[in-house]
Amino acid sequence: MSYQFEQGESLADGVRQIAGHQVHKAIQELQDSESDRHEAIHEVRKRFKKLRGLIRIVRSGLGDDYSRINVWYRDVGRRLSRVRDAESMLESLAKLKQRFDDPAYVDLFAAFERCFQERKQQLVEEWIDLDQELQQLCDDLQTAHRQIDEWKIKGKADKILKTGLQRNYRRGAEALAELYVQPHDELFHECRKRSKYLMYHLRLLKKIWEPIMAAQLEELDQLNDYLGDDHDLAVMTTQLTSEPERFGATSDVDQLITLIGQQREELQSAGLVLADRIYAEQPKAFAQRLQAYWKLWQNQSS
């Protein structure tokens, strides 16, 4: 089943079907003994984020249940973040190596790749109960999967969606406006989270007008690439500065941080250009437009 609402299906049924599919796939990925554990954890964490995007768009319909469901999937995702963060450092370093391909940096990147590999392996070895924790998570997800059938979505579908869309879009626009006043890493991270949720929302609604939604999704994918890469580099900088003794010569650390700074400047600049366009509408107008598309689409199935 795809991550999309279907025409003629009630909103509540759509939410339960999509949520159930995501949890089912997460269980399968954790139980696959042949899969790489790092990749499996990465895929499962993505499914949790998609689930949180799903419940956010119907937040007003879930009522008091929203906070409980959101916190549960947020916390189980965080439990898996240690291994994934270590893998992200290696992926970010590979992108830096591709961007700065001057032969003068070959030894520099090779040295830091060894350091990040050692750090990743150390985290895995220290997490001695990883297999046990993954099995416990599978058991917890089996219970969570059964509970999805009990989710209730109360209210008119188009109004629930309009409220959820407007809330998240407004928060993204506000974070973007603040960035221009006083840019800092936390605000870029907030923009990243809001644009990611917006991307999930448009994926869910893609069929209401596919050509228009597909074009917007393409731009959102690009924005999330820019902001995601920037966030990973911010985390890498924190790692380098908080444990400098792990990474060898101070001059090497300073040189890598300089390269990171250049790359982040480019990513942020490109990201802001896209974000300005994506958040050009007023939140209410944006939500009302998609609400109108939804109503027309649903009426066509009658």
Image: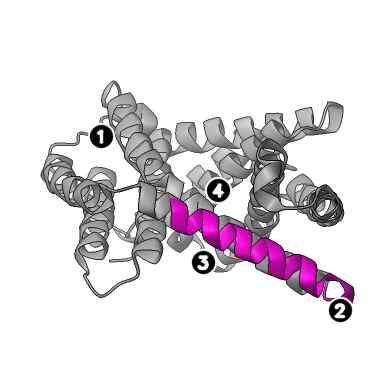
Q: Which of the two marks, 4 or 1, is nearer to us in this view?
A: 4
Element at label 2? helix
Looking at the rendering, in which quadrant would you find the C terminus? bottom left
Residue corresponding to mark 2: 103
Q: Residues within 10 Å of mark 2 (few under 14, many from 20)?
A: few
Say what amino acid the circle numbered 2 marks. Answer: Pro
| Dominant SS type (magenta) | helix
Q: Which of the two marks, 1 or 2, is nearer to us in this view?
A: 2
Q: Which residues are magenta?
A: 101-122
Q: Residues within 10 Å of mark 4 (few under 14, many from 20)?
A: many
Q: Which of the two marks, 3 or 2, is nearer to us in this view?
A: 2
Residue corresponding to mark 1: 153
Element at label 3? helix
Measured Cα–Cα span from mark 1 to mark 3: 25 Å
Residue corresponding to mark 4: 196
Q: In the picture provided, is 52 more to the left or to the right than 166? A: left
Say what amino acid the circle numbered 4 marks. Answer: Lys
User: Residue 76 falls in which quadrant of the image?
Assistant: top left
Measured Cα–Cα span from mark 3 to mark 4: 19 Å
Element at label 1? loop
Q: Residues within 10 Å of mark 3 (few under 14, many from 20)?
A: few
Mark found first going from the N terminus, 4 or 1: 1
Say what amino acid the circle numbered 1 marks. Answer: Ile
Who is closer to the viewer here, 141 or 101? Answer: 101
Q: In the picture provided, is 266 more to the left or to the right than 95? A: right
Reply above or below: 59 against 243.
Answer: above
Who is closer to the viewer here, 288 or 58? Answer: 58
Who is closer to the viewer here, 34 or 186? Answer: 34
Residue depicted at 69% across the width and 51% down the height: 247
Mark 1 and mark 3 in contact? Answer it, CB < 8 Å: no
Looking at the rendering, in which quadrant would you find the N terminus? bottom left
